[in-house]
Image (spheres, rainbow, N blue to C red):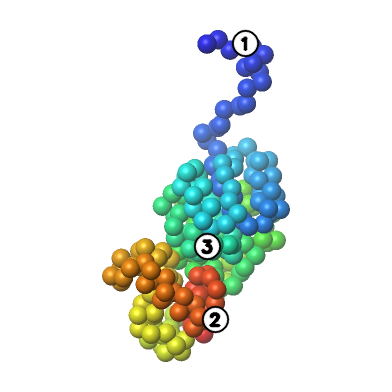
Amino acid sequence: MTIAADDAAQAPPAADPAQVTVVVVDDNAVIRMGLRSLIGASERMRVVGEASDGDEAIRVVRETQPDVTLLDVRMPRRDGVQVTAEIRAWTKVLMLTYSEAPEVVRAAVEAGASGYLVHGQFAAHELERAVLSVAEGSLVLSEPAAAALRAAWAIPAAPPVARHAILGLSERETEIMEHIAAGSGNQAIAAACFLSEKTVKNHINHIFAKLGVRTRAEAVSLWLGGS
């Protein structure tokens, strides 16, 4: 079929394969809109999807397999640390959040994040530079995140026995908590511990109750903090 000159002029431009593809994940619609605007203003990046919670993030990333995913830490359904462990096989992850707690930064990096930026601590051009660097395989940390990570790693992690004694976990719960801190999902934990997923979920519910937390991110934060 021949395309008329007028039709060709109105056709949308083809995607540039040299551009870095990005998925934006944040439960705040205003933040997502702002990030889309920043990325859209760059000739070297383009948004190929977005999500507002952890489950949706995994689905969108699996479908689009972007070069880089901008990911918030605290979200409904699954937190950013959990999501990072799930999607790192399909994309590079750049955490983009308000939290600069040392234990959270450490948990994110250990789960597979390639970068960590703190909102309000970087300019628009620095975001572009960070996305491009992560896409190329570099580890990128904003100064607050780098300082937090140094602080987290300066304190040796307490041995599992000491942690479970202090926090009141059983040996099985300690084993499962170690898997959670390593970024494993319920299915992987079940396979490693020779348990059913239902049993793993029950153990996790008991762990959360004992630790006084509601999400995996909070549990990991407390666990890695050792207090």
Above or below, 204 against 64 in this view is below
Mark 3 and mark 2: span between their CA atoms? 17 Å
Residue 140 in view (yes/no): no
Residue visible at 62% across and 26% down in the picture: 12
Precedes in sequence: disc 2 or disc 1: 1
- Residue 134, image x and y in percent? 51, 51
Q: Secondary structure at mark 2?
A: loop
Mark 2 and mark 1: span between their CA atoms? 66 Å
The residue that disc 3 covers is 78
Circle 3 residues within 10 Å: few <14, some 14–19, many ≥20? many
Above or below, 21 against 216 in this view is above
Mark 2 and mark 3 in contact (Cβ < 8 Å)? no
**Number of callouts in the render?**
3
Mark 1 and mark 2 in contact (Cβ < 8 Å)? no
Residue visible at 70% across and 50% down in the picture: 34
The residue that disc 1 covers is 4
The residue that disc 2 covers is 212
- Residue 36, image x and y in percent? 66, 46
Closer to viewer: mark 2 or mark 1: 2
Name the foreground residue: 140 vs 12.
Answer: 12
Precedes in sequence: disc 3 or disc 2: 3
- Residue 146, image x and y in percent? 56, 67
- Which kind of residue does numbered mark 2 sit on? Gly
Q: Secondary structure at mark 3?
A: loop
- Which kind of residue does numbered mark 3 sit on? Arg
Q: Secondary structure at mark 1?
A: loop
Mark 3 and mark 1: span between their CA atoms? 49 Å
